[in-house]
Amino acid sequence: MVSAVSAVSAVSATPAASSDQAAAHFGAAFAYETDCWDVFESIRDGRQDFVLLDARSPALYARGHLPGALNLPHAKIVEAKLRDYSADTLFVVYCAGPHCNGAHRAALRLAGLGRPVKLMIGGVTGWLDEGLALVSGSSPGVP
């Protein structure tokens, strides 16, 4: 049994949500996010049913990006660039990592254009943390 502590921590100062609220919150996250390993397995197993977009600059993309990813910086996401994709195409966006909001900006732009979108949490940093390789150059590359 854990003994009660007299001081309230910064963690517990705001009470945790109820289990029902937590389940709804964390369950809903899967509609908005995917992770590096799920993206990798989809590519590896030939089940890539999404377009992978690197939302970083062309220079960063050329230095290293996920295999098969297309480079479309978030500020350049406009309807004209998407016209070759059907309206129900799922886009998965990423940027440098958790310290970068480029993927969030890309996701917001795609959603604003009525496109299905998920954010790959972790970005390039997460991909590398999983021990996965990047490809370099200005073309999408292959796994």
Image: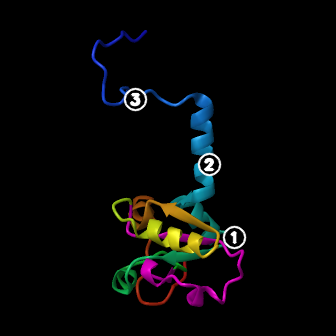
Residue 82 against residue 97 in the figure, above or below: below
Q: Quadrant of residue 135?
A: bottom left
Q: Are marks 3 and 2 in contact (CB under 8 Å)?
A: no
For image coordinates 69% across by 70% down, the residue present is 47
Is any part of residue 63 visible from this angle? yes
Q: Which stretch did the figure color magenta?
A: 70-97
Q: Earlier in the sequence, mark 3 or mark 2?
A: 3
Q: State the residue in front, 2 or 110.
A: 110
Disc sitting over residue 14 in the figure: 3
Q: Which residue is mark 2?
A: 28
Amino acid tagged 2: Ala
Q: Residue shown at 58%/43% (left/top)? A: 25
Q: Dot 1: what SS?
A: loop
Q: Residue at x 58, y 64 (%)?
A: 118
Amino acid type, label 1 = Arg
Q: Residue at x 54, y 82 (%)?
A: 142
Image side of residue 85 versus residue 126, left or right: right
